[in-house]
Image (tube, grey):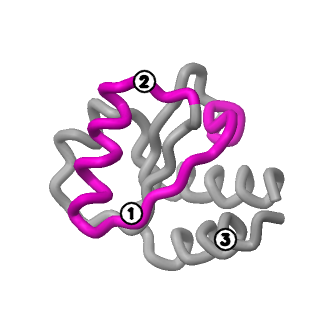
């Protein structure tokens, strides 16, 4: 599962569909389809996560998110593409 998730997140990043970081997300006003948070995220990052999921965006907790997106100290990312978000949700829900 981890390798497939990493591949999908890498594709989303290269295509410009991945928003990385709480500061960018707290000011983002367009449509989001999925938000992922690291299990070790702090209070302020969790607050941003809860804010966005409270608006109807599906969210999930992931271990070692920074390794999946290859960005140091990354604790929060969001996907702004429906197709990619659906593929990522499938792997998260399966728990492969």
Task: Name the residue carrying label 1.
Answer: 80
- 1 or 3: mark nearer the eye: 3
Q: Earlier in the sequence, mark 2 or mark 1?
A: 2
Q: Quadrant of residue 73?
A: top right
Q: Earlier in the sequence, mark 1 or mark 3?
A: 1
Q: Earlier in the sequence, mark 2 or mark 3?
A: 2
Percent x, y of residue 46: 37, 36
Q: Quadrant of residue 8?
A: bottom right
Task: In the rendered view, tell whether residue 64 sits above or below residue 10.
Answer: above
Q: Quadrant of residue 58?
A: bottom left
What is the spatial separation of the Cα atoms under label 2 and label 1, in whole angstroms?
23 Å
Task: In the rendered view, tell whether residue 61 sits above or below residue 23.
Answer: below
Q: Quadrant of the C terminus?
A: bottom right
Percent x, y of residue 36: 50, 50
Percent x, y of residue 64: 68, 34
Task: Name the residue carrying label 2.
Answer: 42
Residue lying at 83% horizontally and 53% vertically, measured from the top left: 3
Residue 60 painted magenta: yes
Residue lying at 80% horizontally and 51% vertically, measured from the top left: 2
Residue lying at 66% horizontally and 75% vertically, measured from the top left: 90
Task: Name the residue carrying label 3.
Answer: 93
Q: Nearer the viewer, residue 84 or 59?
A: 59
- Count residues near mark 1 (Cα–Cα under 10 Å), then give few for <14, some for 14-19, many for 20+: some
Percent x, y of residue 21: 39, 34
What is the spatial separation of the Cα atoms under label 2 and label 3, in whole angstroms?
24 Å
Which residues lie in the magenta part?
Answer: 40-69
What is the spatial separation of the Cα atoms under label 1 and label 3, in whole angstroms?
19 Å
Q: Nearer the viewer, residue 15 or 48?
A: 48
Residue lying at 17% horizontally and 41% vertically, measured from the top left: 27
- Count residues near mark 3 (Cα–Cα under 10 Å), then give few for <14, some for 14-19, many for 20+: few
Q: Quadrant of the N terminus?
A: bottom right
Q: Secondary structure at mark 2?
A: loop
């Amino acid at each position: 599962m981890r390798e497939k998730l990493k591949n999908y997140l890498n594709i989303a990043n290269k295509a410009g569909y991945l928003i990385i970081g709480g500061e960018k997300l707290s000011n983002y006003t367009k449509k989001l389809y999925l938000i992922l948070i690291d299990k070790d995220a702090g209070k302020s990052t969790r607050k941003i996560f809860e804010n966005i999921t409270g608006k109807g965006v599906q969210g999930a907790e992931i271990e070692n998110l920074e390794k999946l997106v290859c960005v140091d100290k990354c604790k929060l990312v969001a996907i702004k593409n429906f197709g990619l978000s659906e593929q990522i949700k499938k792997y998260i829900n399966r728990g492969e």
